[in-house]
Amino acid sequence: MNISGSLLINGQEEFTTNEAIFAINPTTGNRIDIAFHTADENHVNAAAESAWNIFDDFRALPSSRRSEFLKSIANEILALGDTLINKAVEESGLPKGRIEGERMRTVNQLNLFANNIETESWRTTIIDSALPERTPPRSDLRHQKVALGPVAVFGASNFPLAFSVAGGDTASALAAGCPVIVKAHSAHPGTSWLVGKAIQKAAELTGMPPGVFSLLYGEGNTVGTQLVQHPLIKAVGFTGSRSGGLALLNIANARVEPIPVYAEMSSINPVFAYENTLTENADSIAQGFAASLTMGAGQFCTNPGVLCYKDSPSSRAFIEKLMSIIAQSAAQTMLTPSIKNAYDNSVSDFTKITGMTLISQGSEANGPNQCQASIFQTTADRFINNRFMQNEVFGACCVLVSCSSEAQFLEVAESLEGQLTCTVLCNEQDHNQVRPLIPVLERKAGRLVYNGYPTGVEVCNAMVHGGPFPATSNSMTTSVGSNAIERFLRPVCYQDFPNNLLPN
């Protein structure tokens, strides 16, 4: 398939004379010479109006029809074959195996929502029948959830498939009956276009109204701002930086009609390693932790950025092993030059903090946009009292926090902001010490991990990918798993309606 670089609006390709954007191959540092047409306010209006005009028809479709649509999107993504894989590799610098795995995750996510909505359980219908003989009498009351309205979705930089054009936000919004307008991430415009065309084709094949999906491009913040400000947009899905998420949240709250912004933003995903398990499993934990830290150059939302331990001979042996593994780790290509520069600046800032010591770094870069894994060390007292040490570094960077006792883990945990994940590494002998920590971690995170590593998120019914601020802008929701659909639904109660006027 030849990539035209067009906008995709209301089932059509739109071309503009606006300044185009180009992707950068992060592995070579060279521009990829495919121009992508950027949107202006007229295109934003056209996309929003086409979504709004078909909204009532789309949400009224039987769930089986929307299920068919989601399954068709999954099939069309698979049908792109190596064309999609090769383009995503070229634009992201990620290895082919990683992209192939992410494609299947995207497909599985679409199929998960497709299968779940077929049961109609998502509507959560509640009926309180009339009680005319009661004093006072009770009306007949029927409670059901309905779609919120057109949703603006912002593609993520670090997952060009699973958190982007056909990712979890799009899949759950479409499942709920909400049309979607995607603002493509400028780092992977070709990947976005291919997936956007797959959605467009799936809509045609399954008889969906063309306004159900649009794809826009834009450099900077202008198009995104216009989307969130548009009165016909009723919710926002975002995965990215804290600053980006907060900017969208502020725009949405400043509207005449404020709308929900479901933003996944910032997390350092702390790990609490207990002495007994470090004594027994120092080598395996060092290997597992290092793999989790460096996976994908650390460019995961759930990358473990902090590890707490009690200072002891066992922990020192573990740290020596970890330092050795990191020192031998290869430099890895990051997603974009700007992400690489931000990583370098963050690591440099950490080296300037009093009481923060750089104890190990990976191999030096041998190509453009490559980063070295970095491990810092500090004490619990310093970590608790210096909020800057708790800043997220997007990349393979971690702070080891030395505690005077495992009881001090509680103090460290209490000092933390909201997180996506918190992990405990322990054995049965530690359970009495771990137990008081669990309520604190429940208050701090959306997912607790026991004797594992947080990197990666399983797509399934039970998964929660969310957490208190600033991990997300709304701690009551998840962006992964079946309950992600709840973000784009709202309850309506029908009082004393005759059966022939009630929704199907």
Image (cartoon, grey):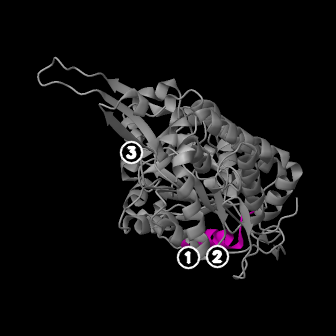
Left or right: where does residue 489 sit relative to residue 141?
right
**Who is closer to the viewer here, 446 or 212?**
212
Separation of marks 1 and 2 at Cα, in angstroms: 7 Å
Residue 194, position in %: x, y?
78, 57
Of the image marks 3 and 1, the number of the one nearer the N terminus: 1
Looking at the rendering, the stretch of residues picked out in magenta corresponds to 333-349
Separation of marks 3 and 1 at Cα, in angstroms: 46 Å
Provide the secondary structure element on which disc 3 rests.
Answer: helix
Residue at 37% across, 53% down:
415
Q: Is residue 136 above or below residue 460?
A: above
- Is residue 335 one of those drawn in magenta? yes
Main SS, magenta region, reads: helix
Q: Which mark is residue 219?
A: 2
Residue located beneath label 3 in the image: 408
Residue located beneath label 1 in the image: 222
Provide the secondary structure element on which disc 2 rests.
Answer: loop
Residue 403, position in %: x, y?
44, 48
- Which numbered disc, 2 or 3, marks the residue closer to the eye? 2
